[in-house]
Image (cartoon, coloured by chain):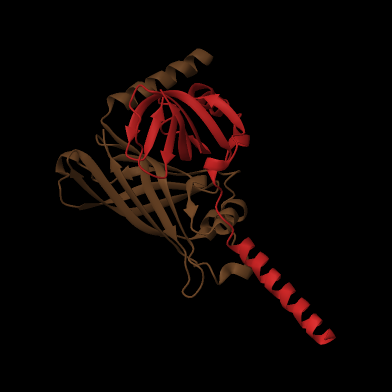
Chain colours: A brown, B red
Amino acid sequence: MKLTFFMTICLIASTICSAQKYSSKTGTIDFEASVPSFEEVKAVNENVSAILNTDNGEFASLALVKGFRFKVALMEEHFNENYIESSQFPKAIFKGKLEDFNFSEVSENDAEYMLKGTMTIHGVTEPFETSVKIKKVNGVIELQTEFELKPEKFNIKIPKIVSNKIANEVFVRAIYSLSN
Amino acid sequence: MKKKIVFLIVMLVLVAGTYTGYKYLYKDHRDITKEVAVMETTAAGLQEQFQNNAADALLNKTLTVTGVVTQIESRSITIEDKVHCSFESAVTGVAVGDQVNLKGRCIGYDDLFEIVKLDQSTLIYTE
């Protein structure tokens, strides 16, 4: 039983390794949920991992939630403890595929692709799609995207008392420089 | 005279209250460089602890890690392909193959690379 499990893992690992992969451990995701005239609600994570399989367009990204840094220390504390509950749910993960991706077509000019898959945040997995811009400069694939997320979809409850200070839709931006 | 004293006390309480309130709302971020590490470990030991799901208590804690540098990026270094440590500023004075000891805040385990991540790292020594 253990052996078969181990062999399957090896098999999966070897197929992953043989595929052409571009990756980064230092992608950047920032999000903003500010409301005008209130304190800025904004955070950045500069240690986001991502892997793109250029053979088939499969893309995965993992952000460690505790890596999101806010300007205001108390806001960071509340974000971790009360909203995203990062001790219980330390990871935010996207897994999916770029539609009609053909690596040979990627050039130095931005091209748009649809990225479809699932997003897991706060322990809740939801179908997700967004448009991404991809280009290749000096052997590095630059992938960036912008989208909006609703906290309530991921079972993140914003208390009434602060709900007027936090936007209903969180604006998210992700930028990766993937190299092989 | 009495009125003056009462007025002074009220003022003092108000100022102190505003000050503590402000200090609470806008308290400083943790300074990882000044914190004492809760654990001293090796890169291999830390990765193993996460792979055995025995590391929840280490999340958000300050750790020191020793090991051999296997990769250097502009603001991060990777130790033995097991621990990725990011810095607040550019990494200098380290080369691949160096034995290092560094301090950082553990932010979790990255399944994609099978690597533990630290942020706000600082080098303690290099050799």
Relative side of B31 to B110, left or right: right
Residue extending furthest toward the front: B1
Q: Quadrant of residue B23?
A: bottom right
Q: Is residue A87 visible?
A: yes
Query: Residue at horizontal 66%, vertical 71%?
Result: B18
Q: Quadrant of residue A24?
A: top left
Q: Is residue B46 above or below residue B110?
A: above
Q: Position of residue B58 (x, y in %)?
A: 59, 35
Q: Is residue A113 above or below residue B55?
A: below
Nearer to the camera, B69 or A177: B69
Number of numbered discs: 0
Residue extending furthest toward the top: A3
Q: Quarter of the image containing the C terminus of chain A?
A: top left
Q: Is residue A1 visible?
A: no
Q: Position of residue A172 (x, y in %)?
A: 40, 57
Q: Position of residue B55 (x, y in %)?
A: 59, 31
Relative side of A116 to A125, left or right: left
Q: Position of residue A68 (x, y in %)?
A: 48, 50
Query: Residue at horizontal 35%, vertical 32%?
Result: B93
Nearer to the camera, A83 or B124: B124
Q: Is residue B7 above or below residue A67?
A: below
